Amino acid sequence: MAVELSFVLITPYSLMKSRTGGILARLLSRTDLDLVGAQMLTPSREFAETYAASMRKHVGKRDEFAAKLFSDYMLDNLSPLPDGSRERVLMLLFKGEDACAKLSAVVGQLPNAKNRKTNIIGETIRDTYADLVFNRDGSLNYFEPAVFTPPLSDACEERLGMLADFAEASENIVTNTTHQEPNSERTLVIIKPDNWRCPSVKPGNIIDMLSRTGLRIVGCKIYQMSVAEALEFYGPVQNALRKKLAPIIGKKAFDRLSEEFGLKLRPESEQMLTDSIGRDYADDQFNKIVEFMSGRRPDECPSEELNRPGKVKCMILIYEGPDAVKKIRNVLGPTDPTKAPGGTIRREFGHDVMVNTAHASDSQESFERESRIIKIQNNPMASLIRAHLATMKQ
C-alpha cells in the first residue's frame, strides 16, 4: 500500500461542545497513522464555497443526496457570520499507508439517500458525535457531521491543495472568532513526547480533561523542538536544579567519602563537592530534560545540528479565555505527579517530575516568552502538504 497524506476537519459545533479530545483519541488509537500536522483555521466564504464545490463534484458521483447535505452544511456552518466573525475548524493531518480509507473507517459513514436509517452502536466517530434527524414527512430536521474526511485519494489531493493555500495564508493563532469573551488571556500547553511514542488515547484524553476549564483552543501545531529551543525554553530550570540538587548531592558525597574511607574531611570540602559533583549531577538532570523534549542530549549534539528539528514530537496548544493560565494549571496539577491531586492530568498520566505528560505556562510573561521560542505563529503543516503533493506529481 502507498503512503498517503490525509486529513480530518473537526467542525465548529464539535469544537464548541469540547469533543476534540474524544475525536482525537479515537483517531490515534484506532489507526496506525502518524499525526504529522495540526492547525486551527477560520474559513472564509471563498474557502467554504470552494470546499463545498469539491464535495458536490466528488461525493455527487456516488450519492447526490449526501453531496447536497455535506455542501450545504459547509456553506451554512463554516462561512463567516454577517458581523464578520468566523467559526473555528481544527485540521488534523495524518500520514501512513492507506490513510484515506483508514480515517474514513474510523470516522464512519452517514445514512445515504437509499438508506436513511442505520443502526447506531457507537463504533465510529459519527456514531457517537454526528446527527442526521428527519421529520416524519421525510424532510431533513437537523444535520451535524461532527468531522469531515475524504474517503478517496483523488478528492483528498484536491482538498489538500486548497487547505494548504488557506493554511499558509492564515495566522496560526486565530482571531475574530465567534464566542469571544472579554478580559480573556492566553496560555500555552505542550502535550509532551511521552504521549506520542505509540498509538494511544492519552493525547485526546488530556485535551478532554483540559476542556473542563471552559477555555477555547485558538492555536495548535505538531512540533519537533530542536535542542537549541529546548535549551532556551528550559534555561531557567538549569539554575533552579543547581540550587536544589547540587547541595544535596554534595552532602551525600561528603558523607559517603567520610564513611567509606574513614576520613575526617574539612567542612569546606563539602562545598567543593557541591560545586563539582553536585553541579555535574544537576547539569546531567537538565540535559536529560532537554533530551526528553528534543530527542538528543545537548552535550552529545554537534553545534551545527543544534537548530535542526528534534527527533521526538509534541503538540502545542494555545488556550484562550478568562483566567486561562490559572485554570489550565489547576487541571494540570503540580510538577511532581506523586503530589498531584486525583483528577488532575499529571496524577492520571504523569510518571515523575520529568515525565509529567504536559507543560503549561505559569504566567502571561512565560506565555509570551515560550511562544517566541517555539515560534508559535509558524506552522509547518502547509509545507508538509506541498512537499507531499509535489512527490505525487513525480
Image (cartoon, rainbow, N blue to C red):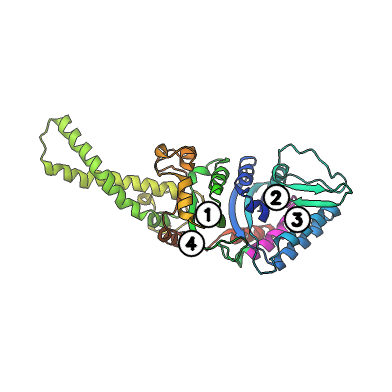
Residue at mark 3: 154
In the image, which residues are magenta?
145-166
Task: Out of 321 and 253, give the one closest to the viewer.
Answer: 321
Question: Viewer-nearest of labels 2 and 3?
Answer: 2
**Residue 146, numbered circle:** 2
Q: Are marks 4 and 3 in contact (CB under 8 Å)?
A: no
Task: Out of 223 and 134, give the one closest to the viewer.
Answer: 134
Category of crowding for the residue at label 2, using alpha-carbon neighbours closer than 10 angstroms: few (below 14), some (14–19), many (at least 20) = many
Q: Identify the mark nearer the N-term, 4 or 3.
A: 3
- Name the residue at 43% across, 46% down: 292
Where's the C terminus, which quadrant?
Answer: bottom right
Residue at mark 1: 317
Question: Viewer-nearest of labels 4 and 3?
Answer: 4
Task: Out of 230 and 326, give the one closest to the viewer.
Answer: 326
Residue at mark 4: 375
Question: Viewer-nearest of labels 2 and 4?
Answer: 2
**x and y percentages locating residue 383 in the rendered image:** 59, 61
Q: Identify the mark nearer the N-term, 3 or 1.
A: 3
Quadrant in the picture for residue 108:
top right
Task: Out of 278 and 364, give the one closest to the viewer.
Answer: 364
